[in-house]
Image (spheres, rainbow, N blue to C red):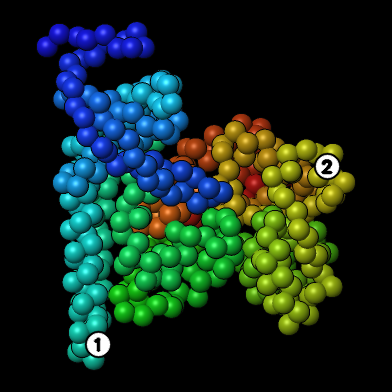
């Protein structure tokens, strides 16, 4: 088929044919951290085997992902160009219906199976087999995640994948939102991912929902990474205990402290060794929660809680004026959310803040040891980066921290790796 010139100077592989029809479409839009769809209208003016020309009064941009629904078949398209034309905009869209259609079929089947499970939960709860229902939920989620993973591998476009996840969340929210844990990790009511209340819920490891929500709660709580997060707390406490009992009067800095659960649970050791602990976090609620729990211990006078943005800690002079030299600096979870280049700079300055003989204790989630799709598709928890052991070591190298100073261990499941860096 001959190439046809585009208005913007390029060429088309397929010839476009006149086509007039009102089209409903949606684009994803981010407001604060919430991402949702704007539902819009336009008019198709021409069509080809893989493209569509539309006119709309909304100023689209190249790279916008559009989701069409003509009432019979849904398709997706990527905006290639957009030109202002009189009182509206002329838009060229490259269509991709194959991969989206496969994902839609899998999503519809997923919702049908979940509805069947929910009906069983309500039909006669006294006769329901909890173990069988949980297995059905697990199998149903596993099957749809295989389709999601296949979609990602075929599309390989982060913009399209991100928009498809938003769309998946909207289509599945009717049932999945009945899980307290899933709903929380899709809406993040504290305003940021990985907030202290969510982690406290994971630590307690008890479903809070009823009906099918109970089994959905249980599903996420039983994932490898959730188990590893609980183990992480235990491992951190043992590492801190080992350091605290070796010397008295240590200065300790806890970065992005959250609920300070490990501090509370180590209270007898902290009190006995006369350690001084500074805990910083940007979340006022987390600090208030920690203060309340610490008030029931004997170490309130040894622990200082401060609202402070840890992202400011890449300046040595500022760090010295705010905190001074430290014997132990630690943080677990927070560094998973920071880009590697920035994190290397941060580590360089944190390392410089240690006294001779001091220790930096941190941890990372090893992407080779868990399935991230649970958190991207079932939850909306994509803030922590997918990194491997090589990535972690490269960050330390870029921070000019010698490998000889680093000791590596893992929590019991092996999913989360700990690094203790000696000064």
Is 229 situated left or right of 219 in this image?
right
Task: Name which quarter of the figure residue 299 lies in.
Answer: bottom right
Q: What residue is shown at x 21% (from left), y 73% (from top)?
A: 117
* Viewer-side residue, 384 vs 228: 384
* Viewer-side residue, 123 vs 69: 69
Report helix, strand or loop for mark 1. Answer: loop
Is 260 situated left or right of 36 in this image?
right
Q: What residue is shown at x 48% (from left), y 60% (from top)?
A: 187
**Marker disc for residue 333:** none
Q: Position of residue 180 (x, y in %)?
A: 43, 71
Q: Is residue 419 visible?
A: no
333, above or below 96, in the image: below
Is 285 situated left or right of 103 in this image?
right
Q: Which residue is labeled 2 in the image?
A: 318
Q: Which residue is labeled 1 in the image?
A: 125
Tell me the quadrant of the picture where the N terminus can be found.
top left
12, above or below 182, in the image: above
Q: Position of residue 236 (x, y in %)?
A: 59, 62
Q: Position of residue 409 (x, y in %)?
A: 52, 54
Mark 1 or mark 2: name the one nearer the start of the chain: 1
């Amino acid at each position: 088929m001959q190439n046809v010139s585009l208005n913007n100077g390029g060429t088309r592989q397929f010839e476009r044919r006149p086509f007039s029809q009102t089209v409903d479409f949606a684009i994803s839009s981010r407001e604060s951290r919430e991402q949702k769809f704007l539902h819009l209208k336009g008019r198709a003016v021409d069509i080809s085997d893989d493209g569509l020309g539309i006119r709309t009064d909304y100023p689209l941009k190249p790279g916008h992902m559009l989701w069409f629904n003509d009432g019979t078949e849904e398709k997706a398209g990527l905006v290639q160009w957009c030109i202002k034309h009189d009182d509206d905009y002329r838009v060229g869209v490259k269509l991709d219906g194959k991969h989206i259609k496969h994902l839609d079929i899998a999503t519809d089947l997923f919702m049908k199976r979940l509805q069947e499970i929910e009906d069983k939960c309500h039909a006669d709860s006294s006769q329901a087999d909890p173990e069988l229902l949980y297995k059905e939920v697990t199998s149903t989620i596993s099957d749809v995640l295989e389709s999601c993973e296949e979609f990602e591998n075929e599309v390989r476009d982060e913009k399209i994948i991100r928009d498809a996840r938003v769309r998946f969340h909207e289509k599945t929210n009717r049932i999945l939102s009945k899980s307290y844990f899933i709903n929380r990790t899709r809406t993040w009511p504290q305003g940021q991912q990985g907030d202290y209340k969510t982690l406290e819920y994971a630590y307690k490891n008890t479903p809070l929902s009823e009906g099918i929500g109970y089994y959905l709660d249980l599903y996420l709580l039983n994932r490898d990474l959730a188990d590893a997060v609980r183990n992480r707390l235990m491992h951190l406490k043992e590492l801190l205990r080992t350091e605290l009992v070796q010397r008295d009067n240590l200065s300790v800095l806890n970065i992005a402290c959250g609920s300070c659960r490990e501090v509370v649970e180590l209270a007898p050791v902290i009190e006995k060794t006369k350690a001084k602990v500074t805990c910083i976090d940007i979340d006022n609620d987390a600090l208030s929660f920690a203060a309340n729990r610490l008030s029931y211990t004997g170490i309130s006078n040894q622990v200082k809680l401060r609202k402070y943005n840890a992202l400011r800690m890449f300046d040595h002079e500022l760090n010295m004026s705010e905190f001074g030299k430290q014997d132990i600096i630690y943080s677990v979870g927070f560094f998973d959310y920071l880009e590697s280049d920035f994190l290397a700079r941060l580590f360089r300055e944190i390392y410089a803040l240690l006294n001779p003989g001091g220790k930096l204790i941190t941890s990372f989630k090893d992407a080779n040891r868990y399935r991230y799709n649970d958190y991207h598709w079932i939850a909306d928890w994509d803030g922590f980066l997918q990194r491997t052991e090589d990535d972690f070591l490269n960050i330390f190298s870029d921070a000019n921290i010698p490998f000889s100073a680093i000791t590596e261990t893992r929590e019991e499941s092996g999913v989360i790796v700990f690094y203790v860096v000696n000064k």
